[in-house]
Image (spheres, rainbow, N blue to C red):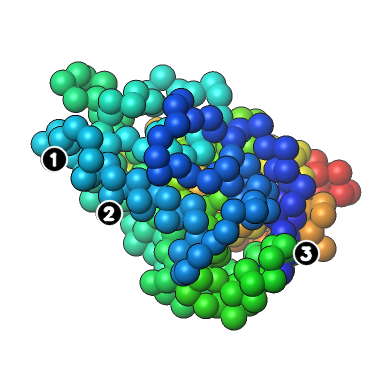
Amino acid sequence: MRMHDTDDHFDDYLDDNPFGGRRSRPRKPKQSEAARSFEGDFDQESTRAGRLTEAERARLAAVRESALAGPVLPPGADRWTTWDDGEQGPHPRPDWLVTELAAADTELGVLKSGKEADVHLIRRAVPDTDRGCVMAAKRYRSNEHRMFHRDSGYLEGRRMRRSREMRAIANRTSFGRNLIAEQWAVAEFAALSRLWSIGVPVPYPVQRSGTELLMEFLGSSDGEAAPRLAELRPDADELVELWHQLVAALELLAGEGMTHGDLSAYNVLVHKGQVMLIDLPQIVDVVANPRGREFLARDVSNVMNWFRARGLPDRLADPDTVTGELLAAAGLD
């Protein structure tokens, strides 16, 4: 994915995104055609009015309609499923995923609050059946905060074709901040879809509607989230195994010409003994981005420091060697 300037355009990396979802049937209020592809969300000709983007207005309207119209919600449920209202995840879809339109969503609480997004726990279930699943709902903030702390670096190069939108983003107006929030949601959903499809250990991306991203919940059946790498104190053998797993994941990324872009021990989860990469809206194209090598080296250094502090053997703990191997995998040796 290209690295970017506030003015620039989400381009080539997923222009021909094969993972755009299909609605099972039309339903009003419809989300715009923008939700179907990574680039299309910002090149559509439909208008955006006021402070909210049109896609976000549609999502909020759908939530209101779900609550006020149609059949009465099951006890405790907060909305009917939004499965057919948004961009859907890639095939093959996992067996645990509930796609039935008779399902309803129930909010179970907040998993994490951050400066840029909050992550909620949601149960989607078909009433009067044992069919259900638990998902993480990442909701990017827009008007509620002044700016994303990563905007200046990670939005470079993402050109938007309408000057009004470019000015709104550059000036950080309320409308511009909402556009940025939507860009981050689109970017993360597209990145997760691509990475999951090539076997990178990331949570399955279920769907995206406006600034809300639903994804696989990594944790226990009772709602306890998998621990972050930073929270663990592995023994020597476990430490080496986790390091090998993480390097293998970075090699898969590098083979596609990418690096995480903001990697640390805080955005790697360990779920059932397997490392899982999270927080990926800023994924970097190391080939096209002038700073790509720098971002890759920083990713390696950040996680290497954590592993070395916990006793990773010297034979594995050379960041220059690992960085060189990853650049070679990306075709940049």
Sequence-wise, which precedes: disc 3 or disc 1? 1
Q: In terms of depth relative to the viewer, which is nearer, 68 or 320?
A: 68
Give the residue type at disc 3.
Arg
Residue at disc 1, secondary structure: loop
Q: Which residue is mark 3?
A: 291
Q: Are marks 3 and 1 in contact (CB under 8 Å)?
A: no
Question: Relative to 11, is 61 on the left or the right?
Answer: left
Q: Is residue 316 visible?
A: no
Q: What is the spatial separation of the Cα atoms under label 2 and label 3, in whole angstroms?
A: 35 Å
State the residue at coordinates (72%, 37%).
Answer: 16
Give the residue type at disc 2.
Val
Sequence-wise, which precedes: disc 2 or disc 3? 2
Q: Which residue is mark 1?
A: 76
Q: What is the spatial separation of the Cα atoms under label 1 and label 2, in whole angstroms?
A: 16 Å
Q: Which residue is mark 2?
A: 110
For the residues carrying marks 3 and 1, which lies nearer the camera in this image? 1
For the residues carrying marks 1 and 2, which lies nearer the camera in this image? 1
Q: Residue furthest bottom?
A: 171
Where residue 116 sits in the image (x, y, percent)? 45, 65
